Amino acid sequence: MAIDLSGRTAIVTGAGGGLGRTHALLLARAGARVVVNDIPQNLVNAEAVVEEIRSAGGQAEAAGASVTDEAAVAEMISRAGTVDILVNNAGILRDKSFAKMDLADFRLVVDVHLMGSVICTKAVWDGMRERNYGRIVMTTSSSGLYGNFGQSNYGAAKMALVGLMQTLSLEGAKNNVRVNCLAPTARTAMTENLLPPQALELLKPEFVSPALLALVAENAPNRTILCAGAQGVEQAHVSLTRGISIKGMDDLEAAQAILDRLGEIGDPATACIPASGLEQAQTELGKAMAG
């Protein structure tokens, strides 16, 4: 049975092109009314996406607003009315090695990716909780989850979004507000000259959007990180190993023991996925109190 979003309103930020466009198109195909957002300078692109949706029989409208502009975001939400789905997709790149990076570029990337998502999410949060329904997706990245040379600013922002999702998914659960992350792999202007044509064809943005749709469905999961690209879908986890106890050791000996036993401490066979951050403390207290 196909996912049906009829009667739902979705906002997709940064949707004038790329992944945001394909997300918006698929959400509309599933029956959602879509607010296609982009910065005012790209409003013509957002309007073109709206026309694509309307031409296919869907409902859509454009909204020009920077996600970092609180007043503009508030106005966009007000005009949209009831918002059931928020896709935090807007972002920018300012890639350089950390040694060469200007702090202004670091702040700018964090501001757009992290604070832009915070501002948009805060604007819809109370309404979703009051109506006991909401689906929010944060766009994270393998650069945040696993690192990528030259993307310290981008990676820091993208991993911060995972932390935001982890907490909001807990806070929203009792009101049926489900919050998840999507880590997409798709071709961009940056990859055009780095990858062969066959690889670029496999990395179409539209191959990512089905994972997005799954994360905003009626029966969507909560607190899930999906990775998607080239028609493949994976799940990433922030896990915790059983580790060791250094109880009773001298501090200097304990430090050396940690180094000597890193393999044991990090054994993935003992890993679990904590239900909340409290489980780390519970795990450590359990080892301390044993015996």
Image: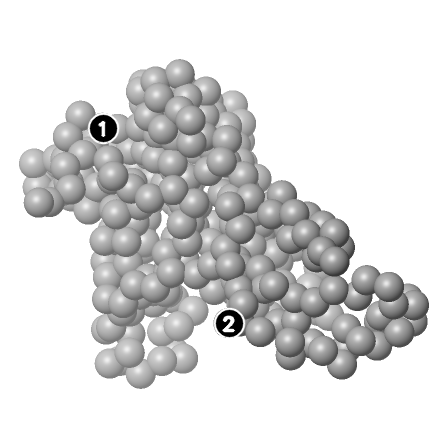
Image quadrant where residue 215 sits:
top left
Q: Position of residue 209 (x, y in %)?
A: 26, 53
N-terminal of the pair, mark 2 or mark 1, is 1
Q: Tell me the crowding category of disc 2: few under 14, some 14 to 19, or many 20 or more residues within 10 angstroms, Cα based.
A: few
Label 1 sits on what residue type?
Arg
Mark 2 secondary-structure assignment = helix
Q: Which residue corresponds to mark 2?
A: 269
Q: Is residue 167 left or right of residue 189?
A: right
Left or right of 235: which side holds 217?
Answer: left
Residue 44 visible? The answer is no
Marks 2 and 1 in Cβ contact (< 8 Å): no
Comparing 82 with 194, the one in front is 82
- Residue 14: x and y in percent read 38, 44
Tag 2: residue type?
A: Ala
Structural distance between the alpha carbons of marks 2 and 1 = 42 Å
Query: Residue 24: x percent and y percent?
Result: 25, 43
Q: Which mark is residue 8?
A: 1
Locate the C terminus and report the quarter of the image it occupies: bottom right
Res 62 label: none
Q: Residue at x 25, y 39 (%)?
A: 219
